[in-house]
Image (tube, grey):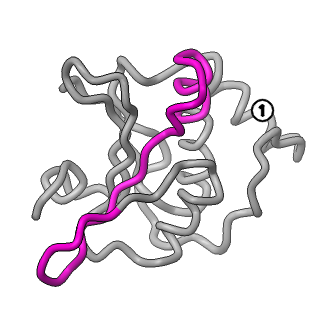
Amino acid sequence: MGNRADEYGTDVEIYRRWLNPTIYAETPTGAPAKLLDQLDQLGFERHQFPTPEPVYIWHEVPAHLDSAEQLRMATRAIPSLLLAGYQANCTPGVFDEAAYQQAVHDIRSGTSRQTTHPPGPPATSRRAAPTRRTP
């Protein structure tokens, strides 16, 4: 079962489906456990659908957060993913520029407001900035 990360060849695709308030973070089929764990640590909720191997896994921003906090949480995850060496894309409808800039500032100053563990060594050397796609 393919997904946006498989389609675009990225590590993480953060987006909202048409007419759906849920924000998704999709990883490629067979994504490494380290990436999936990092999304868990960043506050995303892991879901999976049992299919014949491999299992289809995706993450969602928690539904109990209000819509503004959902956007901030999804956007604040991007700098941490990039710092860990992952290629993360986020659609414009989900991207919050102020939250992104604050997350970058927090990482640089060592005052991250997220309750996550520091990212491990880079997974790969990829682009250092998110690209934004429209659905």
Magenta segment includes 71? yes
In this picture, is 36 found above or below 66?
below
In this picture, is 132 found above or below 52?
above
Q: Closest to the observer: 77 or 23? A: 23
Q: Closest to the observer: 123 or 41? A: 41
In this picture, is 103 found above or below 115?
above
Residue under circle 1? 105
Where in the figure is residue 115, as x and y percent of width and height?
79, 50
The extreme bottom residue here reads: 53
The amino acid at mark 1 is His
Is 78 left or right of 29, judged from the image as shown? right
The residue that appears at 62% across and 48% down in the rendered structure is 43
Q: Quadrant of the N terminus?
A: bottom left
Binning the other alpha carbons within 10 Å of mark 1 as few (below 14), some (14 to 19) or many (20 upward) gives some
In this picture, is 25 found above or below 29?
above
Is 115 left or right of 99, judged from the image as shown? right
Is 11 left or right of 40, judged from the image as shown? left
Q: Quadrant of residue 103?
A: top right
The residue that appears at 53% across and 19% down in the rendered structure is 96
The residue that appears at 56% across and 68% down in the rendered structure is 37
Magenta segment includes 90? no
SS at mark 1 in the image: helix
Q: Count of labels shown?
A: 1
Q: Which residues are magenta?
A: 48-74
Q: Quadrant of residue 87?
A: bottom left
Where in the figure is residue 99, as x and y percent of width and height?
64, 23
Q: Closest to the observer: 65 or 94? A: 65
